[in-house]
């Protein structure tokens, strides 16, 4: 099943709709969607390595625009939408405790979440709900998301074929590691932070 999903994703990455899909996933992931855009970015770069930077740029722009939606959810719709999303990730009760701290150091938190597998959407919503300075939020989001997506895309561009062969050979193990990291991020979010 994993092999079929991988083959389907690789074939989707080479279609004319791939960039629209990448932009949509990147946008949604920054505000509410749990799956990171890397699941489409990686096969897109492997399928068309010459356009690695275009895909990274598209991913970055769409992700920052989606982060602004997350910020707006936190700012204007916290009670109706933001609180249930934060409750889903186990962070609703921590909101008041960290709001003051977050307005002082939140830019670093946004940068951390923008670069790592940590659920970025949680901090985009926190940022709007706590009133983190919007300019700070935008700047660190651009830096963090660009750093993440351009680094991934560049490494795939630079070492594409060996990485592709490695992925295809160890797909099952890599998928298991991806799941551990994904759920580990949610676990850390819920129980550690």
Image: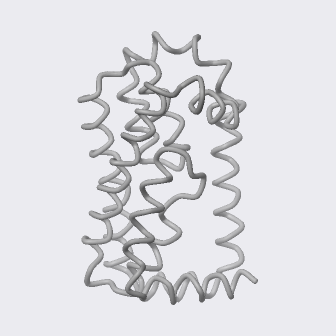
Please, is residue 89 above or below residue 168 in the view? Answer: above
77 relative position to 160: left or right: right
Would you identify the image quadrant in which residue 150 lies? bottom left
Q: Nearer the viewer, residue 64 or 108?
A: 64
81 relative position to 180: left or right: left
Q: Nearer the viewer, residue 31 or 53?
A: 31
Residue at point 41%, 41% (across, down): 69
Q: Position of residue 47 (x, y in %)?
A: 41, 87
Q: Quadrant of the C terminus?
A: top right
Please, is residue 171 above or below residue 108 in the view? Answer: below
Q: Position of residue 22 (x, y in %)?
A: 42, 68
Would you identify the image quadrant in which residue 44 lies? bottom left
Residue at point 66%, 82% (across, down): 5
Q: Residue furthest right?
A: 1
Would you identify the image quadrant in which residue 156 lies? bottom left
Residue at point 69%, 60% (across, down): 179
Q: Position of residue 21 (x, y in %)?
A: 45, 71
| Image mark count | 0
Q: Quadrant of the N terminus?
A: bottom right
Q: Nearer the viewer, residue 63 or 173?
A: 63
Q: What colouring does the structure picture have?
A: one colour
Residue at point 31%, 65% (across, down): 56
Q: Position of residue 101 (x, y in %)?
A: 46, 13
Please, is residue 177 above or below residue 92 in the view? Answer: below
């Amino acid at each position: 099943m994993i092999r079929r999903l991988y083959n389907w994703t690789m074939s989707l990455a080479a279609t004319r709709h791939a960039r629209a899909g990448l932009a949509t996933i990147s946008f949604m992931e920054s505000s509410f969607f749990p799956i990171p855009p890397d699941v489409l970015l990686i096969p897109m770069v492997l399928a068309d390595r010459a356009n690695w930077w275009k895909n990274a740029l598209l991913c970055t722009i769409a992700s920052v625009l989606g982060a602004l939606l997350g910020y707006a959810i936190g700012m204007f719709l916290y009670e109706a939408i933001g609180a249930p999303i934060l409750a889903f990730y186990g962070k609703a009760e921590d909101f008041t405790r960290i709001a003051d701290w977050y307005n002082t150091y939140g830019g670093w938190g946004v940068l951390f979440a923008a670069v790592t597998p940590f659920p970025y959407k949680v901090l985009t919503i926190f940022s709007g709900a706590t009133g983190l300075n919007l300019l700070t939020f935008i700047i660190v989001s651009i830096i963090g998301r660009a750093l993440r997506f351009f680094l991934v895309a560049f490494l795939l561009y630079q070492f594409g074929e060996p990485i592709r062969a490695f992925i295809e050979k160890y797909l099952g193990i890599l998928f298991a590691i991806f799941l551990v990291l994904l759920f580990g991020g949610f676990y850390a979010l819920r129980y550690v932070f």
